């Protein structure tokens, strides 16, 4: 019969569902529904619910799949500041591979186990450079704010090499300024302690 749907021969599992959802989302994030994913996989909508609770759970899984591709903070770099820089530039380039999904990644990252692990790696790398936890958190938050602002600044248009170059420059200026500010604050605190009451 001409109207019969194809029979899926591959095993349906969470990984296959997430891969199909990512394909749908890359074409049009607004069209990402359980129904559109089931059509992509040529299965019934009900079959998806055996593996994924619903659209929000599916989106969270898509975000995890994207973020798991982010470069970790590499201890081989030998400098926590440079390792954090490499991670952030890698994350920027990674999200550029998924146009239209950056808002979804941003919205779901605060609750993402993978994003939490990336944050821990960045903060740990900075602490390895001698920063206190408070200093490392301040640096990481500042870098995050820069990254979020960069994502918003280019929203709705294609990114280009100049965008990445500008972001890298801004990141370098920010990291250099933060490093200098931390050193100045420490020097000031040391001078105050030397003077005493």
Image: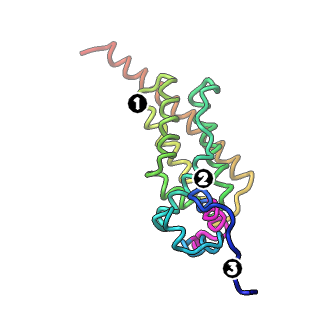
Of tags 2 and 1, the one toward the viewer is 2
Which numbered disc, 1 or 3, marks the residue that appears first in the sequence? 3
- The relative height of residue 74 versus residue 66 in the rendered view (above or below) is above
Of tags 3 and 2, the one toward the viewer is 3
Compare residues 9 and 14 and report the one nearer the observer: 9
Task: State the CA–CA distance, disc 1 to disc 3.
Answer: 57 Å
Task: Report which residue position mark 3 lands on.
Answer: 5
Q: Secondary structure at mark 1?
A: helix
- The relative height of residue 116 versus residue 98 in the rendered view (above or below) is above
- Residue 154 shows in the view: no
Task: State the CA–CA distance, disc 2 to disc 1.
Answer: 28 Å
The quarter of the picture where residue 11 lies is bottom right
Q: Is residue 26 magenta?
A: yes
- The relative height of residue 171 versus residue 183 in the rendered view (above or below) is below
Left/right placement of residue 143 relative to residue 196 reads: right
Q: Is residue 23 magenta?
A: yes
- Residue 102 shows in the view: yes
Residue at the spot 62% in from the left edge and 59% down from the top edge: 16
Residue at the spot 49% in from the left edge and 52% down from the top edge: 109
Main secondary structure type of the part rendered in magenta: helix
Task: State the CA–CA distance, disc 3 to disc 2.
Answer: 31 Å
Task: Report which residue position mark 2 lands on.
Answer: 66
- Give the class, few, some or many, for how many residues have Cα within 10 Å of label 1's Cα (few <14, many ≥20): few
Which numbered disc, 2 or 1, marks the residue that appears first in the sequence? 2
Q: Secondary structure at mark 2?
A: helix
Image quadrant in which the N terminus is located: bottom right
Image colouring: rainbow
Task: Report which residue position mark 1 lands on.
Answer: 133
């Amino acid at each position: 019969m001409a109207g019969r749907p194809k029979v899926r021969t591959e095993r349906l599992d969470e990984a296959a569902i997430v891969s199909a959802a990512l394909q749908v989302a890359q074409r049009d994030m607004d069209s990402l529904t359980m129904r559109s994913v089931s059509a992509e996989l040529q299965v019934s909508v009900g079959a998806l619910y055996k593996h994924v609770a619903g659209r929000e759970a599916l989106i969270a899984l898509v975000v995890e799949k994207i973020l798991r591709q982010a470069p970790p903070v590499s201890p081989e770099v030998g400098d926590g500041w440079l390792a954090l820089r490499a991670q952030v530039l890698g994350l920027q380039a990674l999200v550029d591979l998924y146009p239209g999904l950056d808002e979804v990644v941003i919205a779901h990252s605060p609750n993402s186990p993978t994003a939490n692990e990336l944050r821990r790696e960045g903060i740990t790398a900075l602490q390895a450079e001698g920063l206190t936890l408070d200093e490392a958190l301040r640096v990481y938050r500042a870098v995050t704010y820069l990254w979020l602002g960069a994502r918003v600044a280019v929203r709705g248009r294609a990114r280009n090499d100049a965008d990445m170059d500008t972001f890298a420059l801004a990141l370098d200026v920010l990291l250099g300024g933060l490093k200098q500010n931390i050193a100045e604050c420490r020097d000031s605190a040391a001078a105050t302690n030397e003077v005493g009451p």
